[in-house]
Image (spheres, helix red, strand yellow):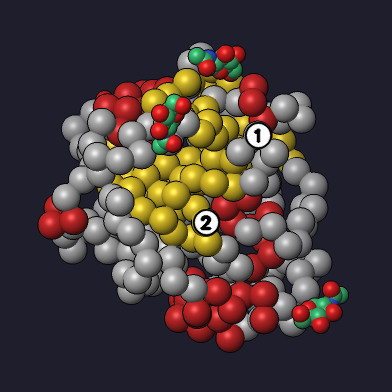
Amino acid sequence: MLFSALALIAASATAVVGCPQHSNHKRSHLQGRQTDPNANTTQNIWAYEASFNWGKLSPDYRLCQTGTQQSPIALSLGNGLSLNHVPTFNYTGSVPGNFYNWGYGPAFTVAHNGDWTSHPSFTYDNETLYLKGWHIHAPADHSVGGDRSKAEMHFVHVDAEGHEGAVLAFRLDPGNFNNTFFDQLPAMIGFDEMQTEESIEMDLSLAMESVQYFNEFWSYQGSLTSPPCHEGIRWFIARQIMFTGVEQMQAILGASTYSARAEQEVWQHRINE
Ligand SMILES: *[C@@H]1O[C@H](CO)[C@@H](O)[C@H](O)[C@H]1NC(C)=O
Ligand SMILES: *[C@@H]1O[C@H](CO)[C@@H](O)[C@H](O)[C@H]1NC(C)=O
Ligand SMILES: *[C@@H]1O[C@H](CO)[C@@H](O)[C@H](O)[C@H]1NC(C)=O
Ligand SMILES: *[C@@H]1O[C@H](CO)[C@@H](O)[C@H](O)[C@H]1NC(C)=O
Ligand SMILES: [Zn+2]
């Protein structure tokens, strides 16, 4: 169904200035794009091609340069895997939401009725966090043992008040079979133009199944991977790669723009602790 032709709904190009990329509101990513006519051009221009310099662009982005737990970082099996913070999932059934392009690739925001606790969720350390949505970076943000996957999908989670607290990261690579998670998505042809969004329903548990519900994972204390680079985000990176079909990967890459931040030096990330 990935290539089935569905009518695309023209979206109003409303800019939401001031939301970080991981807030995952539709169009919020536009804060960083020079193509956004409403962007505060003094404050908000940043580019992945110059991610080394984000801290100098605005006082609000200082943490990008001086933070102690910046993401992403390089991982390896030498780090071992996490035995702490083991997640359990409450991801059942299909949920409605918006499928769109966050400016750098495919994204989906769960429809929100004001109650975060009605969203799919996961629990670790006695705390439950709720899915706000997902988006894809290409290539992957996190390398493992020096290998970088073709893409990486982030499931962004918030607490009951809507504050971002954790990201589940899925490394994506092409394999031999179409993935049932991506089979749910409509065509992405021309999808890099940021002009469309579409209401769809998705069974998000299919992504969890693809990585055996994070039965093996790395975890660390990190940050948003785009300005303002806020910290206090717990990352979970599945060891299992989420494989897609070849055509599915080509559709994802075709709808994506380079969106991996340079890897940061490990400092106070407390990997797997
Ligand atoms: C844009 O950002 C600059 C630097 O932070 C700030 O001084 C200015 O007031 C902002 N302008 C608007 C219109 O928000
Ligand atoms: C799972 O989440 C739903 C809301 O999506 C909630 O009604 C249900 O109580 C949750 N189940 C558990 C075991 O927490
Ligand atoms: C979770 O709650 C249980 C029971 O209250 C407690 O024994 C345990 O230490 C808590 N775990 C964490 C990581 O806070
Ligand atoms: C995957 O799906 C595409 C259509 O989207 C189809 O052309 C292709 O043959 C499928 N590949 C496999 C391995 O099933
Ligand atoms: Zn991300």
> Which residue appears at 70% of the width and 39% of the height?
161
Callout 2, which amino acid? Gly
What residue would you read off at disc 1? 160
Residue drawn 41% across the image and 56% down it: 221
Classify 10 Å Cα crowding around label 1: few (below 14), some (14-19), many (20 and above). Answer: some
Q: CA distance from mark 2 to mark 1?
A: 16 Å
Ligand 2 closer than 8 Å to label 1 CB: no
Where, by quadrant of the figure, is residue 35 drawn? bottom right
Residue 129 visible in the displayed image: yes
Q: Nearer the viewer, residue 38 or 247?
A: 38
Q: Residue at x 73, y 62 (%)?
A: 18
Please give the residue where the numbered disc 2 appears in the rendered image.
232
x, y percent for residue 89: 42, 24
In which quadrant of this rendering is ligand 2 seen? top right
Q: Please indicate, yes or no, whether residue 197 appears anywhere in the rendered image.
A: no
Q: Position of residue 227 (x, y in %)?
A: 58, 68
Numbered disc 1: secondary structure = loop
Would you call the spot at circle 2 few (<14 residues within 10 Å), some (14-19), or many (20 or more)?
some
